[in-house]
Image (tube, helix red, strand yellow):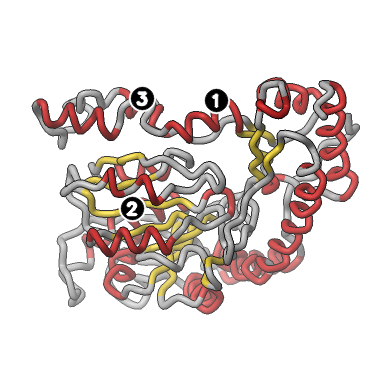
Amino acid sequence: MLKKRFKRFNTYDFKELNAARNVVSSGILSNYLGVWGERFNGGKYVKKFEKNIEKFFKVKHAVTVNSWTSGLICAVGALNPKPGDEIITTPWTMSATAMSILHWNCIPIFADIDDKTFCLDPSKIEEKITKKTIAILSVDIGGQSADYEKLNYIAKKHNIKIISDSAQAPGSLYKNRFTGTLTDIGGFSLNCHKHIHTGEGGILVTNNNKIAERLRLLRNHGENVNTKKKLRDNPGMIGYNFRLGEIECAIGIEQLKKLKKIIKGRLKIVNKLNKELSKLKGIVVPSVRKQCTHVYYVYKIRIDRSLTGISRDKIFSELIKMGIPNISKKYGNLHLLEIFKKMKPFNQKLFPWSLNGKRAVNRYKRNYSYGSCPVSERLNKNEYIGFEVCSNQLDEKELDYIIKSFKKIWKKFNIV
């Protein structure tokens, strides 16, 4: 076992320090006002960061927010949803994805995932679409884009929108376009263990002028301005204080400059892991689709017990004994959270928009019932091991230790 802990991932240096110092010295840590006017969209660092994002990701509009959870709430809200509307999403993600749907009294409909990429399986989408469906909320989980060619085809066919939760995938490409920019609304997280971070924060991106306007209203108490400003669509909306401060944006400007270098370093780590671990019988290393790139927030492997002869859990336990940090054998399966189990059969106290009668119960059984995402459940139960490469710097010594640990386990259990 290594004598010292793996070094925490950190790309901050004097550039971020100077950026924060300059903001503090100015005395203006935030320059928002929740009324229409010059300060409605924030101060100079907010505006500069957003312009830099637009240029980097080649989009018309970028809107910063104080967390990606806030970003998801804004993204769903920008679609002007009505209580009881349905949004199809993945179970294999962090809870904020589904909670952003519930926030608007809408219903998350869980569709299963592809076991190679862990992203939404397009072939499982259309069976979930009803007259109530208004959108697909896809997640580019772990660092690779979902299949947006197929998802966009389905969305266009059924006249629904797509939101891409690309929190873990900034800088990844889908057919030479940045993940997160291929849908009606996309975006990225800036919290402490993402590729680039400002402590907390999020970025929304869109090429739709009307949606961008609604995102900015939702970010900053839109109810105060929608009667003062001549909007193209005046929905009588509410808004929030989801504003990102000047310090965070000044730091974000410096972090964005480092994104390509960070991705390059991450790929160097993963290429070595792939090369060595793929030699071990029963390990399925991450799959990357053609014409796509992967930026590896999480390094996801699968254990094929029919080849190893021992369970995933036993392998995982051995890795823990060897001191391998930031690994997990569980992820997502949001459809099995207690909040969704308690919906049966549409609990009126929890969800006042719920439907009554036999039809509602049948819809519940079809879309929400336990076991409705068998691929996601199988991966969690038997196959998945995730290594959070986002959490550590990983020098050559640490990387070699991880690889040697796997090889020792394979030798110990005589897996050949």
Mark positioned earlier in the residue sequence (2 or 3):
2
Mark positioned earlier in the residue sequence (1 or 2):
2
Q: CA distance from mark 2 to mark 3?
A: 21 Å
- Residue that badge 3 annotates: 370
Q: CA distance from mark 1 to mark 2?
A: 26 Å
Which residue shows up at 32% across the image and 46% down it?
88
Work out whether residue 201 can be spotted.
no
Identity, as a three-letter code, of the amino acid under mark 1 = Lys
Give the quarter of the image for residue 228.
bottom left
Specify whether 310 is left or right of 50: right
- Residue 149: x and y, percent? 42, 64
Task: Report the quarter where the C terminus lies.
Answer: top right
Which residue shows up at 40% across the image and 34% down it?
373
Specify whether 115 is left or right of 106: right
- Residue 38: x and y, percent? 35, 78
- Residue 109: x and y, percent? 30, 40
Mark positioned earlier in the residue sequence (1 or 3):
3
Nearer to the camera, 383 or 207? 383
Identity, as a three-letter code, of the amino acid under mark 2 = Ile
User: Which structural element holds mark 3?
Assistant: loop
Which residue shows up at 82% across the image and 38% down it?
402
Give the quarter of the image for residue 411.
top right
User: Which structural element holds mark 2?
Assistant: strand
- Residue 283: x and y, percent? 71, 37
Which residue shows up at 68% across the image and 68% down it?
260
Nearer to the camera, 381 or 220? 381
- Residue that badge 1 annotates: 381
- Residue that badge 2 annotates: 136
Q: CA distance from mark 1 to mark 3?
A: 14 Å
Nearer to the camera, 141 or 342? 141
